[in-house]
Image: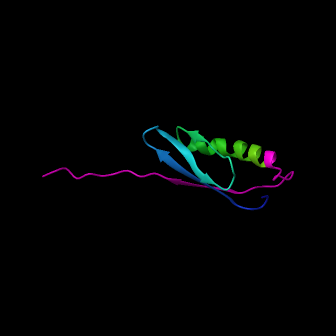
Amino acid sequence: MPGRLIVVKAVRDAEAGVWLVESSDVPGLNLEGETLEELSDKLPGAILDLLEAAGDLSDGVDVPVELIAHASTRVRAPAT
């Protein structure tokens, strides 16, 4: 995996009030944070741990990570 771009997709769970990893290129990556920044801050350590455990990490290699976030809401026009 070294040198390959890792894509992590995050989604906002409005009910739980957290951002969470919806999918990623790293098997077993399950994280959440109250803010997107908190989730983003947790990613490097968790990804390194999982890559190391899988034997997919070489010393001194930079692994680029792209975090894609998605949130949605509804707007309802008042009844007239």
Q: Residue at x 46, y 37 (%)?
A: 16
Q: Residue furthest right?
A: 59
Query: Exactly how many numbered labels are in the figure?
Result: 0
Q: Residue at x 63, y 54 (%)?
A: 24
Colour treatment of the image: rainbow
The overriding secondary structure of the stretch rendered in magenta is loop
Rendered location of residue 63, percent (x, y): 75, 55
> To which quarter of the image does residue 9 belong?
bottom right
Rendered location of residue 29, percent (x, y): 66, 46
Q: Which residues are magenta?
A: 52-80
In magenta stretch: residue 54: yes
Q: Is residue 7 left or right of residue 13?
A: right
In magenta stretch: residue 5: no
Q: Which quadrant holds the N terminus?
A: bottom right
Q: Residue furthest left?
A: 80
Q: Residue at x 51, y 49 (%)?
A: 11
Q: Is residue 38 left or right of residue 63?
A: left
Rendered location of residue 69, percent (x, y): 53, 53
Rendered location of residue 40, percent (x, y): 61, 45
Q: Residue at x 70, y 61 (%)?
A: 5
Q: Is residue 52 left or right of residue 74?
A: right
